[in-house]
Structures are given as structure tokens and as C-alpha cells.
Image: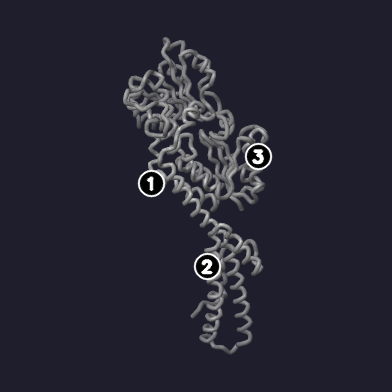
Amino acid sequence: MSLLVVGLNHRSAPTSTLEKAAVPDDDVPKVLHDLSQAGSVAESVVLSTCNRTEIYAEVETFHGGVADVSDQLTRITGTQLADLAPHLYVHHEARAVGHLFSVVCGLDSMLVGETQILGQVRSALRVAQAEASVGATLESLFQTALRVGKRAHSETAIGTAGASIVSVGVRLAAGEWGPLPADAPDPLPGSTSAGNAPADGALAGRRVLLVGAGAVGALAAAVVRRAGATDLVVANRTAARAHRIADTYGAEVIPLTHLADELSRADLVISSTGASGLILTQGVVADALARRDGQPLVLLDLALPRDVDVAVRELPGVTLIDLETLRTVLEGQQAVSDVESVRTLVASEVSAYLDRRRAHRVAPTVVALRAQAAAVVREELLRLHTRLPNLDARDWAVVEGAVRRVADKILHAPTVRVQQLAAAPGGDSYAEALRELFDLPREAPAVVSVPDLPEAP
């Protein structure tokens, strides 16, 4: 069995390709089911965010697993593998573990150190658990990754860059209404410092419309309120979710059917629905502009696939900030000073995880060896019992206990040592040597159970 991840992200693929690869929440169970039907995939988790779509899998064979997972990604994107392959990356075993740990710590994010990815990884695991697509391997891997992510944010200051790319987007949007306060940092800073967040009061007097009330929408509500937005309106397909945000941040709730009317009043629109089609078309925005008396409109599209038609950029008075815009802004940023500390932490955690994984892999060999020894002991005791029928119960218990202890003592040193050696890189060779020397089966019993083997007195 092998661990692997196949995926694409904001570094490997353009936004147009990421849009095609995005898996809506409602579609993830089907993708997991399809993967379970693939010949080589034993376990799987799908991680799909605005910056990446990745499939983590435990597979029977590396090449077969890559083929099955890649085939699933081509079906998701509706493209040929030849067209998708240049944007895909594949990580195997140690590199797969290191990649996930880096992702969950925010090292691989568009905005280094962002915290939202931790919750997204947790959600991906929960869905996989609900669909029974994870087993012991991926359960252990993802639980460890979540612990590593928490360590990174609690033991270093990597998270001080800001809550997420939402902060950067809102800051860019606020800059559209004129210069920021004199004491505010440059809106396009050269580092992922707290200056990426919008300045207090940057949205004072502004009316903000949130389209979508998921995790991104809730985060956006918090950011715009901190930036001083005067009025906040939430539009969402599910009213209950919209009201949760409204109750927390003092917002007004409107149905999606009133979206066109609200567009004529809002200064800033932040859309993050995750819908499969466009929410704000050029026609809808053009109609709203006709009722705005020349007032500018800023649209911040944080959805993938996109919610806002890129053609709105052709409309006078409209500014569209989307994920492609944010990627360009953040592309050249320098990492925070704590990045090296987190990388060191990740390297240490990867090493420890792989040591445990290698040691765990030798366990079936140890179990098989002990099972074989137990069977030999049992056979010899039965033979001895036939030859010594006149031994009383007390003497027989002494003989049986002695034979059992001899077997245990002979096995103790090599089985303990092989587990220690197996934890090191290349340790699989020691388990292989044991299997060859003792002619052990490749698949060992889960436990050694020998009820007729007497206990020592």
C-alpha cells in the first residue's frame, strides 16, 4: 500500500483550470464513492478550496493509484488528461505527508499563514469519515496533520498575516474609494504582515452586500465590520445561515430574489456562494448601474468557480477584484519570519510520522512470527503430552510454562529489534528478511490467538 496525493493549486494551474477542478460540497460524496470503486484506491479524502483541488489516497500500487486518481480529476474538470497533466502534481509517501502538513500549516497557501485552511482540511476529513472513505491510514495522517497545523499556529506567529485572503481582498476594495489613512500600511505590502488586513475605518460610511453565508461569508462579515462598514446586508439561498451571520454582526437579511435591487444600493459586494453558475452576470450588474447615479461599484469575487462574470470589467464605474487579482498581488510577497520555524516543525513532524508508519508496517510480520512460534509450541506440547501421559497436573503446568517462556524469550530480542530498525529509512528490508528466513505469509493475522496454549504457572 502507498500514500499519494494528486492535485493542482494556485501555483500549478491558472484560475480558469482551478474553476473547472473545483468540487462543490454537495458533489464530494459522489467523488469519494467513485474513487472507492476504482481498482487500486483503498482510502480517499478530497480537499477542494478556492486555491486547490487535491485527492489524497491510500492505494494498492503507485502507478495504478495515480492513474485512477488522475482519471477522476479529468472527469471533474471535463478535460483530457493530456490537457490537465501539465497542471497536476503527484507526491508519494514522505512527500505526500510533507505536502499535507505544509498545506494545513498555511505554508502552501496563496497568503502564507492563513488560518482558514485548517478548518477546510478538518471539513474534508469529516466528509470522508461520513462517507466511510477513510481507514486507519488516512485517519491517522489527517488527525496528525490537524495537530501539526494547530502547533504551527500556537507555537509560532505565522498566523499574524491575517485571517485569510478575505482580508487582503477587502483591503484592496477599500482602496478603491481613495487613499487610506496616512498611518495605514501600503495596501500592496511586500510581506505577509498584519498590514494585509483593512485599516480600521477603511469602510466607514460604506454599505456592504455579502452574497453567500458559508465560512467565507462569515469571515468576510467579521472583516468588513472591523473595517467599519456602516451597513451590512446578507443574501443567501438558505435563510437560516444568513440569519446566523446577521445575528452575530448586526446585518440585514434579504432573499436572493432581491439581489438586483440591493446591487443598486451597495458600495461593495463580496460574493462567495460556491454555486456552479454565475450569480452576477454583466446584464444584472449593468441594470444596477443604471440606478446608481454614477456611484462606483466594487465587486469582490472570492468564489471558485467564480460568481461574477469577468465581462463586468467592461462596465464603467465597476471594479472587479477576483482570485486571479489576489494571486497577482500576493505572488511576490516575502514569507513571515516564522515560516522557517514552521518548516522546521513540519520536517520534524514528517520524520516522526514516517517512523511510526514504518514501525506499524512491520507489525504484521511480528504478529506472523509470533503466531508461527505459538503454533510450533502448541504442536510440541501436544506431542510431549502423548509421550508423558503420567505427569500430574502440577508438573505438566511447569513443563508447559517453561516451553512457553523459552519461545517468548527467544522471540523477544529479534521482534523488539526489528521494530526499532523498521522505524528508520529502509527499515522495510528487515521485515522482508524475517519473512524470507521464517517463510512467513505476506498477510498476517490481526492478533495471535492460541486459547489452547497453557499460561505459565
Inspect this view and state whether residue 240 appears: no
> What amino acid is found at the position of numbered circle 2 in the picture?
Val
Residue at image point 42% right, 10% down: 294
Q: CA distance from mark 1 to mark 3?
A: 40 Å
Residue at image point 54% right, 24% down: 278
> What amino acid is found at the position of numbered circle 3 in the picture?
Asp
Picture mark count: 3
The answer to which quarter of the image holds residue 14 is top right
Up-down relation of residue 304 to residue 93 (above or below): above
The residue closer to the viewer here, 383 or 161, is 161
Q: Which of disc 1 and disc 2 is earlier in sequence?
A: 1
> What amino acid is found at the position of numbered circle 1 in the picture?
Glu
Q: Which of disc 3 and disc 1 is earlier in sequence?
A: 3
Please name which of the two marks, 2 or 3, marks the residue nearer to the observer: 2
Q: Which residue is mark 3?
A: 71
Residue 118, position as x, y percentages in the image: 45, 41
Residue placed farthest to the bottom in the image? 390
In the structure shown, which secondary structural element does the residue marked by tag 3 occupy?
helix
Residue 113, position as x, y percentages in the image: 43, 38
Up-down relation of residue 201 to residue 382 (above or below): above
Q: CA distance from mark 2 to mark 3?
A: 42 Å
Q: Which mark, by number, is residue 155? A: 1
In the structure shown, which secondary structural element does the residue marked by tag 1 occupy?
helix
- Tell me if mark 3 has few (under 14), some (14-19) or many (20+) residues whose alpha carbon lies within 10 angstroms of its own: some
Q: Which residue is mark 2?
A: 416
Inspect this view and state whether residue 253 appears: yes
**Would residue 114 be found to the left or right of residue 92 on screen?**
left
- Tell me if mark 1 has few (under 14), some (14-19) or many (20+) residues whose alpha carbon lies within 10 angstroms of its own: few
